Amino acid sequence: MNLIFTGGGTGGHLVIALSLAEAAASRGHRVVFIGSTSGQDRQWFGESTLFEATHFLDTTGVVNKSGLGKLGALWKIVKAVVASKALIRDFQADAVVSVGGFSAAPAALAALISKVPLYIHEQNAVTGKLNRLLRPYAKGFYSSYEEGENHCDYPVGEGYFQNARVRSEVKTIIFLGGSQGAKFINDLALELALWLHEVGIHIIHQCGLKEEERVKTAYLELGIHAEVYGFTTQIASLIAQSDFAVSRSGASTLWELCAAGVPAFYIPFPYAAGDHQYHNAQYILKNDCGWCERQGEGIAEKLKAAITSDIAAKSAALSSLILPSGAAHIIEKIENNFS
């Protein structure tokens, strides 16, 4: 099949596009990517050898604009839809697979206009505005939070599963603020650093590039040896070494921790669209596999209680929420519609 993957803007969307495209290419399908000149799309795929071609159209988000800015963004999308129709036609696409984000709008809309089947993967427990709009017209919709025919295992790298194990006690803790870091989580880690040191827990801390110098200096002043990373591509390895995580609850990080069997104390980003990080974490709580607290006062004592609790049952239960090869299974579902 000839498959076009579209969507992005942020790493959370793009990592799914990458996983699905890799699975499709490994099964002999031709793959092309359509994204935007805005956001991180070009950074991820500008020099990719995975796709036969990559196209970055001049689009921006609409939701965060007002007045003339919104009209300008909509006009860019209209022009990009026309360009996407031509790309779909020239590639003779059998299907368009959207991973959401503003980058997905032109190609997804062009697929519907061109009567090419549209498939959607939704990363979060709260469906994004674009995916919510397009879902009734899509040939398939895949989510890790829904039951029934729409359910899919989240596309997570095989390495997380290969290094999975049941954690019975906390010897190493990892603080994850995401690629941009999170000041609240950084400050919380530093507040707890002396206590963690006293109880013999090693600290791994991914703090974001902007906070790296401040956080490293703070640990030095406390006399504590901690592994501090502004940004790293070795998160899978660091998670494998960890027994407990303190993290935002973006979808990819949440499911990576789940696949690795690492119990986590989630602190959702309070300004995420639709409060989706909070709802992502609620899925873990519903299955009694972790903790979630809004950021605010008094959270340190709740975190201490979680760290010193019996974590083995939660760690063991995480593996029941996700199976390997999620991306391959989604591509299989798409293939089945053409068989």
Image: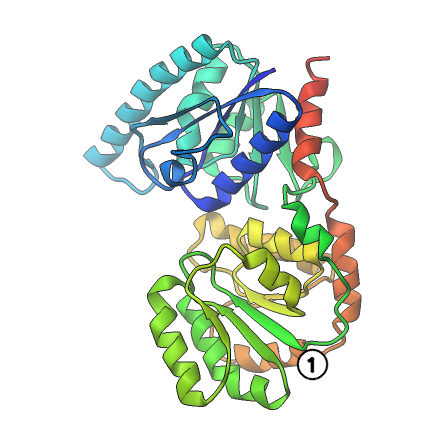
Q: Amino acid at mark 1?
A: Thr
Q: Nearer the viewer, residue 314 or 229?
A: 229
Q: Quadrant of the image for the N terminus?
A: top right
Horizontal side of residue 73 vs 148, given as left or right? left
Q: Specify the quadrant that holds the C terminus.
A: top right
Residue 167 visible in the displayed image: yes
How far across and down, in percent of the image, does residue 191 sit? 47, 83
Residue 309 image position (x, y, % from top left): 72, 78
Q: Position of residue 115 (x, y in %)?
A: 52, 10
Seen in the picture, residue 69 relative to 268 is either above or below; the reply is above
**82 horizontally vs 265: left or right:** left
* Residue in the picture at 35% in, 14% down: 82
Disc tally is 1
Residue under the point 71% across and 60% down? 261
| Residue position marked by numbered label 1 in the rendering | 308
- x 31%, y 43%: residue: 64
